[in-house]
Image: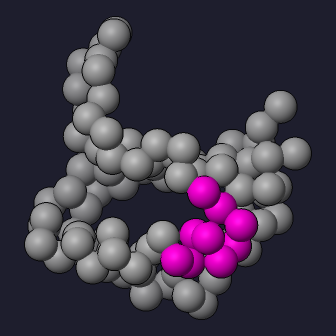
Amino acid sequence: MAAYIHAAIEITDASGYEEYRARVPAVIAQYGGRYLIRGAPPVYLEGSPATTRFVMLEFPDMARLRAFFDSPEYAPLVAIRQRCARSTIIAIDGV
C-alpha cells in the first residue's frame, strides 16, 4: 500500500534552501518516491494561511518511506532544511 509524506514548509533562508531543493529529488527517487505536489502556492478554501509551501511525496509503502527519511543520504539534507526552513512533516499510509 502506498505511503505519503506531507510537508508544510515555511522557508526562512531562500538562498540556503536552494541546495536542499537541488539535491533532494535524487534521494527521493533512489528510495522509490515521487513528487505529487512540489511547492505550488496553496489556495486556502477554509482557514487562515499557516505556511507558504506544500510538498507531497508518494512512496511504494511505509517501509520505503521510512528508509528514505532515515537514510544516510537524506541526513545531511535534513540539516540544511532545518537550518533554512520551519517544517511540519507527517507520514501517512494510503488506502
Using the rendered view, name the quadrant where residue 27 is placed.
bottom right
The relative height of residue 81 versus residue 47 in the rendered view (above or below) is below
Numbered-mark total: 0
Please indicate whether residue 64 sits to the left or right of residue 40 in the image: right
| Image location of residue 26, percent across then percent down | 52, 77
Please indicate whether residue 32 sits to the left or right of residue 95 in the image: left
Using the rendered view, name the quadrant where residue 59 is placed.
bottom right
Please indicate whether residue 63 sits to the left or right of residue 42 in the image: right
| Image location of residue 25, percent across then percent down | 48, 70
| Image location of residue 51, percent across then percent down | 26, 38
Tell me, yes or no, if residue 51 can be seen here. no
The relative height of residue 37 versus residue 87 in the rendered view (above or below) is above
Q: Which residues are magenta?
A: 26-34
Q: What is the quadrant of the N terminus in the image?
A: top right
**Residue at horizontal 40 percent and vertical 79 percent from the top:** 23
**Residue at horizontal 31 percent and vertical 39 percent from the top:** 40
| Image location of residue 22, percent across then percent down | 33, 75
Tell me, yes or no, if residue 17 can be seen here. yes
The relative height of residue 74 versus residue 63 in the rendered view (above or below) is below
Please indicate whether residue 15 sits to the left or right of residue 21 in the image: left
As for residue 63 lying within the magenta part, the answer is: no
**Residue at horizontal 77 percent and vertical 37 percent from the top:** 94
Q: What is the quadrant of the C terminus in the image?
A: top right
**Residue at horizontal 23 percent and vertical 70 percent from the top:** 17
Specify the color scheme: one colour
- The residue lying furthest to the top in this view is 46
As for residue 29 lying within the magenta part, the answer is: yes
